[in-house]
Image: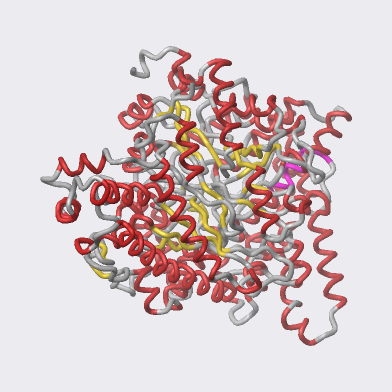
């Protein structure tokens, strides 16, 4: 079926909007919102935003040898005082780190300044291609002549590389250990691409207390100090909090003054009144507690945008918006200050601000692992109250409704599903899913809450969890782990198992253990033993690199604006980046990421079936075919492709997945962090399954060399043939849940719009979600789109500029993705629910 001949029932709301050339895909928007949307989308690819980098560099030159937290606060102060500011026509929510209306991405030279020239080269080389970033001649000159000379050799990425023990550095960077730019991806080390793990600040502090209240708390604590120890270890943090509070107020007041000046010159009476209101609001918040719904949204935006100026964490979790904004919404409705329509317009203005923020990675390898400019402005909806009742309210529906109209990738709504989630909410969530933009995603209270209880949270705290990232979770005032993690490449593990520890793409070098020539193995048990030895060997290096990151981070990063919103940080008078030294009372797990699990399961299953159970192949036949990347061995490859596959209800195959989980969880349990804090096993790939596959040779499941790995906890793309319920049951059997070390796992599913059309389709998808919940899965999300649309978008990218697809815990514009990732999304199984 071509998109040209498809009927309306065959197309999602998004596809219908693109086919008809409409801006709005559901309902209506105000003229203001339509103009803003078109102006932002017409700007084109994101551009690097350098004012923050330049001013931070200027400040850091002046503050060398001072405590890092004070240096950071002073840099924020300089930015607030000197950064150019702008308010554009139609804006109601204001504040940005640049002076253009369109997508932008902040550069953070203290993170990876040594690789910035390579980033410039990558972006300029990819000009006009998917994922391109605008770097003007002036931008390139600033990076190469102002930023790089100061930060080269002083940035965190260089320090991390140099601090690794030689053996771990070899695993992470390969034989050319001086190449900071090109990690091997045997381990994906995400601390070099972001200051912080995905995070959700407690914005309610800004709304309810204002930064004045936070500042007063810091001043009072300072007045209590008398011990010399406090003067050295605590005083700098509190001084930094005070400076940061002042900086945020300064920045907001500059916008207030600009709005006031613009109002005086404005000829249009309606816009003049709006500018005067913006000025009044920015003079009040974030310094003071928000009094109205409009003030609350602007205050929340001040908090999140200043946090982005402070650092990058990929995620900027918005918390439980339908809970903490409800009182402002209800009061303003009752007082006649707003209507449902005006509140929706304010949400649209906030969402459009978020949509312009782009996560740009200057390291080309890290950029490949986060395609589509992955970012997560997670808005948590539903769930439960502190006393265990369903938390759904009127604002839950309004927020969800406000995400439907525009073809933008933000915010990232998430529904917390539990046994008593109302059918009305689930029904509406499925209707939004059917629009085709890939959200809302759904997470399972009955998995996340027990996880937190097992890791020391109170029931009241556990019931208040938030989403932060793909399917990562946060307790905003209890968790302190803010360091990027290490990810296990199951593709590399599989290859090393069958190539005696060597990796062909990486120069046929010995990366893993010498576990023997498979030709000498006479039982599957020997295969399994070798596989586990490779996991444990690489797993130890994942832990080592994590401890190195934890140790050195406080010398390179600080986050006073984030830390001042955290109860434990304020209680201990410590920056969150010092969490390598335990915060008393904290939950501080480190993540042991794993990518390509389905590839590993199916490879082991193929060997068991073909070599040992049926003896259809000999070791020589299989190993020679893989070594040749299947060239000249198509018959053998077909045997491998048609071997029993994960995801099809074959219990012995699914059991291999369980055994993999069990082995890793036992390994993690044996080596906890200090203070009884765990490493936790997760399966959240972002788009790293693509570059990790690029460094992996052919595998026994029939996969060719350099092809993407499986994603999330799914089977290989297209391998499941028995329908979504059987797939969910297989995935449930293939994982272990009885460990506190087991955390988030991502599930993607794809359906055609026709399969879920109408009320019957909605009810079928709701029923499947209830099955997902009862099977105790962590997360699920959906692409509702036609394959023909994706193929058409590859041929006519300009026509499909606004087409949004689901990636891995986030949505992105399809035309922002590389051809390889586009192909992977097209190859995902199109399920049929019925």
In terms of image quadrants, where is residue 532? bottom left
Decide if residue 688 is in sight here. Answer: yes
- Between residue 346 and residue 419, name the one nearer to us: 419
- Between residue 393 and residue 61, name the one nearer to us: 393
Note whether 174 is above or below 753 in the view shown.
below
Magenta highlight on residue 300: yes
**Residue at x 51%, y 62% (from the top left corner):** 485
Residue 9 located left or right of residue 3: right
Decide if residue 267 is in sight here. Answer: no
Identify the main secondary structure in magenta: helix
Task: List x then y, in percent, for residue 355.
Answer: 56, 41
In magenta, the rendered stretch is: 292-301
**Residue at x 56%, y 47% (from the top left corner):** 471
Residue 834 located left or right of residue 122: right
Task: List x then y, in percent, for residue 286.
Answer: 77, 52
In terms of image quadrants, where is residue 227? bottom right
């Amino acid at each position: 079926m071509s998109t040209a001949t498809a009927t309306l029932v065959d197309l999602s709301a998004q596809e219908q909007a693109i086919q008809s050339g409409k801006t709005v895909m559901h309902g209506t928007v105000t003229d203001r919102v339509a103009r803003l949307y078109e102006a932002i989308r017409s700007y084109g690819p994101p551009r690097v935003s350098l004012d923050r980098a330049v001013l931070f560099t200027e400040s850091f030159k002046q503050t060398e040898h001072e405590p890092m937290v004070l240096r950071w606060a002073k840099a924020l102060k300089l930015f607030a005082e000197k950064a150019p500011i702008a308010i554009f026509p139609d804006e109601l929510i204001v504040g940005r780190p640049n002076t253009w209306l369109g997508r932008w991405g902040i550069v953070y030279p203290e993170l990876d300044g040594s690789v910035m020239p390579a980033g410039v080269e990558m972006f300029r080389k990819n000009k006009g291609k998917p994922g391109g970033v605008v770097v003007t001649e002036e931008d390139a000159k600033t990076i190469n002549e102002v930023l790089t000379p100061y930060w080269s050799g002083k940035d965190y990425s260089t320090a991390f590389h140099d601090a690794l023990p030689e053996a771990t550095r070899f695993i992470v960077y390969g034989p050319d250990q001086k190449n900071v730019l090109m990690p091997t991806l045997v381990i994906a080390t995400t601390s070099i691409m972001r200051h912080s793990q995905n995070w959700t600040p407690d914005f309610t502090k800004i709304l309810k207390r204002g930064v004045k209240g936070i500042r007063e708390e810091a001043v009072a604590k300072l007045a209590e100090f008398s011990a010399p120890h406090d003067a050295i270890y605590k005083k700098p943090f509190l001084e930094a909090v005070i400076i940061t509070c002042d900086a945020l107020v300064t920045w907001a007041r500059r916008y207030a003054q600009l709005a006031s000046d613009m109002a005086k010159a404005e000829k249009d009476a309606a816009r003049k009144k709006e500018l005067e209101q913006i000025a009044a609001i920015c003079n009040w918040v974030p310094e003071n507690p928000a009094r109205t719904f409009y003030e609350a949204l602007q205050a929340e935006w001040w908090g999140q945008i200043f946090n982005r100026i402070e650092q990058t964490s990929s995620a900027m979790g918005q918390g439980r918006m339908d809970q903490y904004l409800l009182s402002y919404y209800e009061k303003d409705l009752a007082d006649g200050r707003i209507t449902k329509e005006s509140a929706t317009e304010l949400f649209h203005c906030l969402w459009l601000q978020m949509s312009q923020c782009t996560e740009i990675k200057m390291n080309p390898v890290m950029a490949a692992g986060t395609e589509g400019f992955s970012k997560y402005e997670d808005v948590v909806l539903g769930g439960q109250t502190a006393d265990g009742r369903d938390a759904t309210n009127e604002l839950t529906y309004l927020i969800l409704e406000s995400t439907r109209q525009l073809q933008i990738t933000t915010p990232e709504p998430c529904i917390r599903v539990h046994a008593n989630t109302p059918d009305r909410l689930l029904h509406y969530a499925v209707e939004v899913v059917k629009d085709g933009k890939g959200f809302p995603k759904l997470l399972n209270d009955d998995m996340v809450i027990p996880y937190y209880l097992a890791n020391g949270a109170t029931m009241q705290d556990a019931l208040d969890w938030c989403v932060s990232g793909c399917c990562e979770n946060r307790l905003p005032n209890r968790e302190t782990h803010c360091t990027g993690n290490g990810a296990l490449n199951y593709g590399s593990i599989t290859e090393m198992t069958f190539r005696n520890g060597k990796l062909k793409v990486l120069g046929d070098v010995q990366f893993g253990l010498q576990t023997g020539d498979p030709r000498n193995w006479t039982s599957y048990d020997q295969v399994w033993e070798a596989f586990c030895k490779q996991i444990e060997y690489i797993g130890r290096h994942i832990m080592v690199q994590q401890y190195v990151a934890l140790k050195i981070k406080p010398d390179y990063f600080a986050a006073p604006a984030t830390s001042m919103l955290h109860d434990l940080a304020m209680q201990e008078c410590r920056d969150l980046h010092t969490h390598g030294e335990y915060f008393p009372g904290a939950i501080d797990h480190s993540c042991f990421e794993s990518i390509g699990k389905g590839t590993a399961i199916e490879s082991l299953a193929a060997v068991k079936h073909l070599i040992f159970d049926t003896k259809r192949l000999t070791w020589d036949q299989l190993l020679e075919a893989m070594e040749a990347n299947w060239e000249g061995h198509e018959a053998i490859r077909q045997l491998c492709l048609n071997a029993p596959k994960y995801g099809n209800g074959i219990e012995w195959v699914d059991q291999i997945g369980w055994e993999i989980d069990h082995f890793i969880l036992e390994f993690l349990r044996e080596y906890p962090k200090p203070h009884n804090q765990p490493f936790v096993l997760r399966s959240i790939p972002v788009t790293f399954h693509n570059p990790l596959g690029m460094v992996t040779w052919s595998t026994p499941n029939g996969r060719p060399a350099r092809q993407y790995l499986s994603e999330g906890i799914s089977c290989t793309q297209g391998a499941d043939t028995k329908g979504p319920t059987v797939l969910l049951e297989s995935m449930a059997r293939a994982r272990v849940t009885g460990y506190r070390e087991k955390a988030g796992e991502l599930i993607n599913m794809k359906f055609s719009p026709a399969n879920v059309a109408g009320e019957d389709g909605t009810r079928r998808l709701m029923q499947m979600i209830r099955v997902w919940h009862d099977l105790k899965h962590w997360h699920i999300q959906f692409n509702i789109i036609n394959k023909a649309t994706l193929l058409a978008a590859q041929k006519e990218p300009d026509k499909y500029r606004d087409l949004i697809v689901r990636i891995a815990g986030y949505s992105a514009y399809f035309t922002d993705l590389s051809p390889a990732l586009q192909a992977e999304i097209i190859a995902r199984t199109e399920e049929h629910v019925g």
